[in-house]
Image (cartoon, helix red, strand yellow):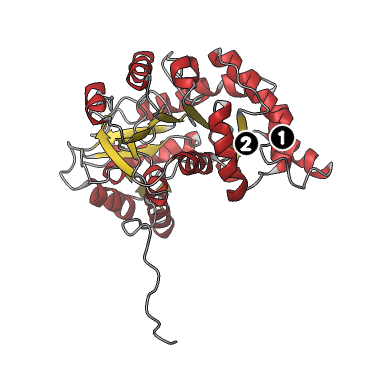
Amino acid sequence: MPNYPNTIASKLPRVGTTIFTVMSKLAQECNAINLSQGFPDFNCPEELIELVNKYMRAGHNQYAPMAGLMQLREVIATKTEALYSAKYDPETEITITAGATQAIYTAIAATIKEDDEVILFEPAYDCYQPAIELNGGKAIYLQLKFPGYTIDWEEVKKVISHRTKMIIINTPHNPTGSIITASDMAKLERLTKNTGIVIVSDEVYEHIIFDGYEHQSVARFPGLAERSFIISSFGKTFHATGWKIGYCIAPGNLMAEFRKVHQFLVFSCNTPVQWALTDFLKNKKNYDELENFYQEKRDYFRQLLKGSKFTLVPALGTYFQLLKYTKISDEKDTDFAIRLTKKFGIASVPISVFYHKAVDNKVLRFCFAKKEETLEKAAEILCKIV
C-alpha cells in the first residue's frame, strides 16, 4: 500500500477510545463481570417492547417529524409541568433526540463559537469537552470537592468572565452519584442573572434519586429555565440504553437554534419507539417508581459490600456506586482497575479519567443496574480482595 502523507490534522488530538469501551472490551477478554459501563443486564419492560412491536406492525416505520412526534412532546410537556411546575410548549420548546449525547452535542454546537468559554465541573462525563473543542470553544475546568463532590460557588464566581458563554451541570451526577441541591441552583441563578450565559443541564438520571431527595431540575427555577437546555434520556429511564432516544427542553429562542443543528445531525429519530413511549409515559408509575427500584439495588449492593475493605462513598443518585480502595492498595486507579479485571474478574471505571488532568483519589465506579445474582457474584469477589 502506498505510503501517503497524513494530510488530516486531528481536531481532537488528545482524545482516544473512551474508558467505557476500553474497560468493557477488557471485561469481555477476561470473561469478567462488567460493572464498568452504565447499562443494565436486565431487559426493559415487556409492555414497552410490545408497544414498539405494535407500532412497527401498524406501519409507523417512516420518518417522524424533525422535532419528534407531537403526541410524545405533549406527554413530555405534561410530565414536566406535573413534576417541576414548569410549562413548555411542545410545538416550539421540546425536541426528541437520538439519545442524550446527541442532545448535549447539539446544544453546544448551536451555542458555542470560536473562543467562547464553557465552565465544566470535574470529574465530568466524557462527551462534554470534545463537543466544546469541536465547536471552537474552550473548556474552563473546576473540580468538585472530594469526597462529597460538591460545587464551590465562590470558585465559579471567580472564573466567570465576559468570555463565559455556557456552564454545564449534571444532576444526578455521573460518575459520582452526587446531586445538586436547591441551594446550589439558587446560587447558580444569582450568578447568571443579567448575563448572556447559557446553561446545559444534563438530567438523564432525573428519576433515579435516593433517600427522599427531590430532583432539582433547572426547570424549577425561572431565572435558570429561561437560559437552559435541559437534557433527558429515555434509554436511562427505561433500561433501554441501546435505543438511543432522549429529548431536549428549552425556551423557544434557544430551541430554534437547537433545531437548526439537530435537523442536519440526525433530522429525526426512531419512529415506532416514539409512538411506544407516548403510550408508556401516560402511566406515571412507569417512571415514578424508578427511584425505589434502583434504591433497593443500591442498598442491596452496599449491604453485600459491608464485609469488604472498600470504603463506600455516598451515592445519592444515578445507578453508580463509588468505592474507595485506600485500605487495599496505593496503586493508581487506572492500574488497580485493570488488575481487578484481569486478576479478580470484575471490571470497573477509574474516576481519574473523568478529569482533563488526572486526579487520583483512589476511587472506582461500579454500576449496580444489574440483576441480584450479578451483584452477589461481584460483591463476593470484592469482599475477598485484601
Residue assigned mark 2: 96
Q: Nearer the viewer, residue 328 or 91?
A: 91
Q: Residue flagged by tag 2: what amino acid is it?
A: Ile
- Quarter of the image for residue 272 reads top right
Q: Which of the labelled discs sits on residue 69, or is there none?
A: 1
Tag 1: amino acid: Leu
Quadrant (top left/top right/bottom left/bottom right) for the C terminus = top left
Q: Label 2 neighbourhood size at 10 Å, few (<14), some (14-19), many (20+)?
A: many
Image coordinates of residue 83 in percent, x first then y, are 56, 15
- Whole-percent x, y for residue 44 in the image: 62, 36
Helix, strand or loop status at disc 2 = strand
Label 1 and label 2: CA atoms lie apart by 8 Å
| Farthest left residue in view | 330
Relative to 226, 78 lies left or right = right
Q: Quadrant of residue 6?
A: bottom left
Q: Nearer the viewer, residue 119 or 115?
A: 115
Q: Is residue 270 above or below residue 180?
A: below
Q: Is residue 239 visible?
A: no
Which class describes the residues within 10 Å of circle 1: few (<14), some (14-19), or many (20+)? many
Residue drawn at the location 18% of the way across and 47% of the way down: 331
Q: Would you say 196 lies left or right of 107 here?
A: left
Residue 337 appears anywhere in the view? yes
Q: Looking at the picture, tell me which residue is in the foreground, 290 or 155.
A: 155
Which corner quadrant holds the N terminus?
Answer: bottom left
Taking 39 as reference, is 286 left or right? right
Labels 1 and 2: the sequence-earlier one: 1
**At which x and y percent is residue 46?**
69, 35
Mark 1 in CB contact with mark 2 (< 8 angstroms) = yes
Query: In percent of the image, x 72 and y 40: which residue is there?
Result: 65
Task: Determine whether the residue tagged by mark 1 lies in a helix, strand or loop.
Answer: loop
Q: Which mark is residue 195?
A: none
